[in-house]
Image (cartoon, rainbow, N blue to C red):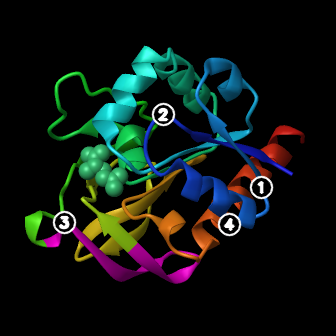
Amino acid sequence: TPVIGVLALQGDVREHLIALAAADAVARPVRRPEELAEVDALVIPGGESTTISKLAVLFGLLEPLRERVRGGMPVYGTCAGLILLADKILDPRSGQETIGGIDMIVRRNAFGRQNESFEASVDVQGLGPVEGVFIRAPWVESVGAEVEVLAEHGGHIVAVRQGWSLATSFHPELTGDHRVHGLFVEMVREKAAAGSR
Ligand code: GLN
Protein backbone atom coordinates (compact mmCIF):
# COMPACT_ATOMS: atom_id res chain seq x y z
CA THR A 1 0.00 0.00 0.00
CA PRO A 2 1.48 3.36 -0.98
CA VAL A 3 2.21 5.89 1.75
CA ILE A 4 1.07 9.31 0.61
CA GLY A 5 1.81 12.50 2.51
CA VAL A 6 -0.31 15.63 2.59
CA LEU A 7 1.68 18.86 2.89
CA ALA A 8 0.30 20.14 6.19
CA LEU A 9 1.45 23.76 6.44
CA GLN A 10 -1.93 25.38 5.70
CA GLY A 11 -5.10 24.54 3.80
CA ASP A 12 -7.58 21.68 3.63
CA VAL A 13 -5.23 18.96 4.83
CA ARG A 14 -7.77 16.87 6.73
CA GLU A 15 -10.09 16.49 3.74
CA HIS A 16 -7.22 15.14 1.63
CA LEU A 17 -6.17 12.68 4.35
CA ILE A 18 -9.73 11.34 4.40
CA ALA A 19 -10.02 11.17 0.58
CA LEU A 20 -6.67 9.33 0.26
CA ALA A 21 -7.62 6.80 2.93
CA ALA A 22 -10.91 6.24 1.07
CA ALA A 23 -8.87 5.64 -2.10
CA ASP A 24 -6.88 2.87 -0.37
CA ALA A 25 -3.67 4.71 0.45
CA VAL A 26 -1.98 5.18 3.81
CA ALA A 27 -2.14 8.94 4.32
CA ARG A 28 -0.16 11.10 6.72
CA PRO A 29 0.55 14.80 7.25
CA VAL A 30 3.98 16.13 6.24
CA ARG A 31 5.44 19.19 7.99
CA ARG A 32 9.14 18.42 8.26
CA PRO A 33 11.84 17.36 5.77
CA GLU A 34 12.23 14.02 7.65
CA GLU A 35 8.53 13.33 7.14
CA LEU A 36 8.79 14.20 3.45
CA ALA A 37 11.64 11.72 3.07
CA GLU A 38 9.40 8.89 4.33
CA VAL A 39 6.48 9.18 1.90
CA ASP A 40 6.13 7.65 -1.58
CA ALA A 41 4.10 10.56 -2.90
CA LEU A 42 2.63 13.89 -1.81
CA VAL A 43 -0.59 15.89 -2.07
CA ILE A 44 -0.44 19.68 -1.90
CA PRO A 45 -3.81 20.92 -0.65
CA GLY A 46 -5.95 23.92 -1.46
CA GLY A 47 -5.57 26.98 0.73
CA GLU A 48 -3.53 30.09 0.11
CA SER A 49 -0.58 29.51 -2.18
CA THR A 50 1.39 32.53 -0.92
CA THR A 51 1.06 31.37 2.69
CA ILE A 52 1.98 27.77 1.88
CA SER A 53 5.02 28.97 -0.09
CA LYS A 54 6.23 31.21 2.74
CA LEU A 55 5.71 28.48 5.35
CA ALA A 56 7.56 25.98 3.13
CA VAL A 57 10.56 28.33 3.16
CA LEU A 58 10.31 28.80 6.96
CA PHE A 59 10.04 25.06 7.61
CA GLY A 60 13.03 24.33 5.37
CA LEU A 61 10.83 22.37 3.00
CA LEU A 62 11.00 24.30 -0.26
CA GLU A 63 14.30 22.88 -1.53
CA PRO A 64 13.55 19.31 -0.36
CA LEU A 65 10.16 19.56 -2.11
CA ARG A 66 11.77 20.76 -5.34
CA GLU A 67 14.34 17.97 -5.14
CA ARG A 68 11.78 15.22 -4.62
CA VAL A 69 9.54 16.49 -7.43
CA ARG A 70 12.57 16.71 -9.76
CA GLY A 71 13.45 13.17 -8.67
CA GLY A 72 10.08 11.89 -9.89
CA MET A 73 8.05 11.63 -6.67
CA PRO A 74 4.37 11.55 -7.68
CA VAL A 75 2.64 14.72 -6.56
CA TYR A 76 -0.93 15.99 -6.78
CA GLY A 77 -1.87 19.64 -6.22
CA THR A 78 -5.40 21.04 -5.85
CA CYS A 79 -6.09 24.75 -6.37
CA ALA A 80 -3.35 26.47 -4.31
CA GLY A 81 -1.46 23.18 -4.79
CA LEU A 82 -1.80 23.53 -8.58
CA ILE A 83 -0.30 27.03 -8.31
CA LEU A 84 2.63 25.62 -6.31
CA LEU A 85 3.34 23.02 -9.00
CA ALA A 86 3.48 25.58 -11.80
CA ASP A 87 6.83 26.51 -13.26
CA LYS A 88 5.47 30.04 -13.61
CA ILE A 89 2.78 32.23 -11.98
CA LEU A 90 1.45 35.15 -14.00
CA ASP A 91 1.23 37.70 -11.16
CA PRO A 92 3.12 36.25 -8.23
CA ARG A 93 2.78 38.10 -4.93
CA SER A 94 6.07 39.30 -3.55
CA GLY A 95 7.98 36.47 -1.92
CA GLN A 96 5.77 33.87 -3.57
CA GLU A 97 7.85 30.90 -4.66
CA THR A 98 6.73 27.79 -6.46
CA ILE A 99 7.94 24.24 -6.23
CA GLY A 100 7.42 23.84 -9.96
CA GLY A 101 7.50 20.61 -11.90
CA ILE A 102 4.71 21.23 -14.39
CA ASP A 103 5.61 23.26 -17.47
CA MET A 104 2.66 25.63 -17.28
CA ILE A 105 1.79 29.24 -16.58
CA VAL A 106 -1.07 29.75 -14.10
CA ARG A 107 -3.32 32.70 -13.38
CA ARG A 108 -4.33 33.03 -9.72
CA ASN A 109 -7.97 33.79 -8.75
CA ALA A 110 -8.66 33.57 -12.46
CA PHE A 111 -12.37 32.91 -12.48
CA GLY A 112 -12.98 36.39 -11.07
CA ARG A 113 -15.21 38.11 -8.54
CA GLN A 114 -18.53 37.12 -10.07
CA ASN A 115 -17.49 33.53 -9.67
CA GLU A 116 -15.45 33.52 -6.46
CA SER A 117 -16.75 30.08 -5.83
CA PHE A 118 -18.97 27.77 -7.82
CA GLU A 119 -19.58 24.17 -8.68
CA ALA A 120 -19.63 22.72 -12.15
CA SER A 121 -19.49 19.34 -13.77
CA VAL A 122 -16.05 18.84 -15.29
CA ASP A 123 -15.27 16.15 -17.82
CA VAL A 124 -11.94 14.65 -16.71
CA GLN A 125 -10.08 12.51 -19.21
CA GLY A 126 -10.22 8.88 -18.14
CA LEU A 127 -12.86 9.52 -15.45
CA GLY A 128 -15.81 11.21 -17.16
CA PRO A 129 -17.90 13.88 -15.41
CA VAL A 130 -16.63 14.92 -11.97
CA GLU A 131 -18.27 17.47 -9.67
CA GLY A 132 -15.79 20.37 -9.62
CA VAL A 133 -15.75 22.66 -6.59
CA PHE A 134 -13.96 25.90 -7.54
CA ILE A 135 -12.97 28.34 -4.75
CA ARG A 136 -11.07 31.44 -5.86
CA ALA A 137 -9.63 29.03 -8.34
CA PRO A 138 -6.70 29.49 -10.68
CA TRP A 139 -6.73 28.36 -14.29
CA VAL A 140 -3.89 27.25 -16.47
CA GLU A 141 -3.11 29.92 -19.00
CA SER A 142 -0.78 27.83 -21.17
CA VAL A 143 1.11 24.55 -21.10
CA GLY A 144 4.32 23.20 -22.62
CA ALA A 145 4.52 20.28 -25.04
CA GLU A 146 5.07 17.67 -22.30
CA VAL A 147 1.88 18.54 -20.45
CA GLU A 148 -1.28 16.53 -20.95
CA VAL A 149 -4.51 18.53 -20.55
CA LEU A 150 -7.03 16.39 -18.63
CA ALA A 151 -9.94 18.86 -18.35
CA GLU A 152 -11.18 22.27 -19.35
CA HIS A 153 -13.97 24.43 -18.01
CA GLY A 154 -15.39 27.41 -19.92
CA GLY A 155 -12.53 27.16 -22.40
CA HIS A 156 -9.87 27.22 -19.69
CA ILE A 157 -7.55 24.41 -18.63
CA VAL A 158 -8.39 23.16 -15.12
CA ALA A 159 -6.65 19.75 -14.89
CA VAL A 160 -3.24 18.65 -16.14
CA ARG A 161 -0.68 15.91 -15.87
CA GLN A 162 3.03 15.93 -16.66
CA GLY A 163 5.01 12.82 -15.88
CA TRP A 164 4.24 11.92 -12.26
CA SER A 165 2.70 15.30 -11.43
CA LEU A 166 -1.07 15.86 -11.42
CA ALA A 167 -2.93 19.12 -10.72
CA THR A 168 -6.53 20.36 -10.65
CA SER A 169 -7.94 23.89 -10.22
CA PHE A 170 -10.85 22.38 -8.32
CA HIS A 171 -11.18 20.46 -5.04
CA PRO A 172 -12.21 16.79 -5.34
CA GLU A 173 -11.37 16.41 -1.63
CA LEU A 174 -14.45 18.48 -0.78
CA THR A 175 -16.89 16.11 -2.46
CA GLY A 176 -17.66 12.53 -1.48
CA ASP A 177 -16.31 11.36 -4.84
CA HIS A 178 -12.79 9.96 -4.48
CA ARG A 179 -12.13 9.06 -8.14
CA VAL A 180 -9.53 11.77 -8.74
CA HIS A 181 -7.65 10.66 -5.61
CA GLY A 182 -8.07 7.11 -6.93
CA LEU A 183 -6.43 8.18 -10.20
CA PHE A 184 -3.52 9.63 -8.21
CA VAL A 185 -3.14 6.50 -6.06
CA GLU A 186 -3.08 4.50 -9.32
CA MET A 187 -0.25 6.76 -10.61
CA VAL A 188 1.67 6.14 -7.36
CA ARG A 189 1.27 2.36 -7.76
CA GLU A 190 2.43 2.58 -11.40
CA LYS A 191 5.48 4.59 -10.37
CA ALA A 192 6.35 2.01 -7.69
CA ALA A 193 6.00 -0.82 -10.23
CA ALA A 194 8.11 1.10 -12.78
CA GLY A 195 10.78 1.68 -10.11
CA SER A 196 11.11 -1.99 -9.19
CA ARG A 197 11.36 -3.29 -12.78
N1 GLN B 1 -6.68 31.73 -4.58
C1 GLN B 1 -5.88 30.84 -3.79
C2 GLN B 1 -4.39 31.05 -4.01
O1 GLN B 1 -3.97 31.88 -4.74
C3 GLN B 1 -6.24 29.40 -4.04
C4 GLN B 1 -7.59 29.11 -3.50
C5 GLN B 1 -7.81 27.69 -3.10
O2 GLN B 1 -6.88 26.90 -2.91
N2 GLN B 1 -9.06 27.35 -2.87
O3 GLN B 1 -3.63 30.36 -3.43
Which percent across, then down, holds residue 18? 65, 60
The magenta stretch spans residue 120? yes
First to last magenta residue range: 115-132
Left or right: 29 as drawn, with respect to 149: right
Looking at the image, tell me whether mark 3 or mark 1 is earlier in sequence order: 1
Could you tell me if the residues under marks 4 and 2 are in contact, i.e. CB atoms within 8 Å?
no
* Residue to which mark 2 is pinned: 9
Comparing marks 4 and 2, which lies closer to the viewer?
A: 2
Residue drawn 53% across the image and 84% down it? 128
Looking at the image, tell me whether mark 4 or mark 2 is earlier in sequence order: 2
The 10 Å Cα crowd at callout 3, few under 14, some 14 to 19, many 20 or more, is: few
The residue lying toward the viewer, choosing from 115 and 195, is 115
* Residue to which mark 3 is pinned: 116
* Residue to which mark 4 is pinned: 182
Is residue 105 something one can see in this rendering? no
Residue drawn 19% across the image and 66% down it? 116
Comparing marks 1 and 4, which lies closer to the viewer?
A: 1
Disc 3 residue type?
Glu
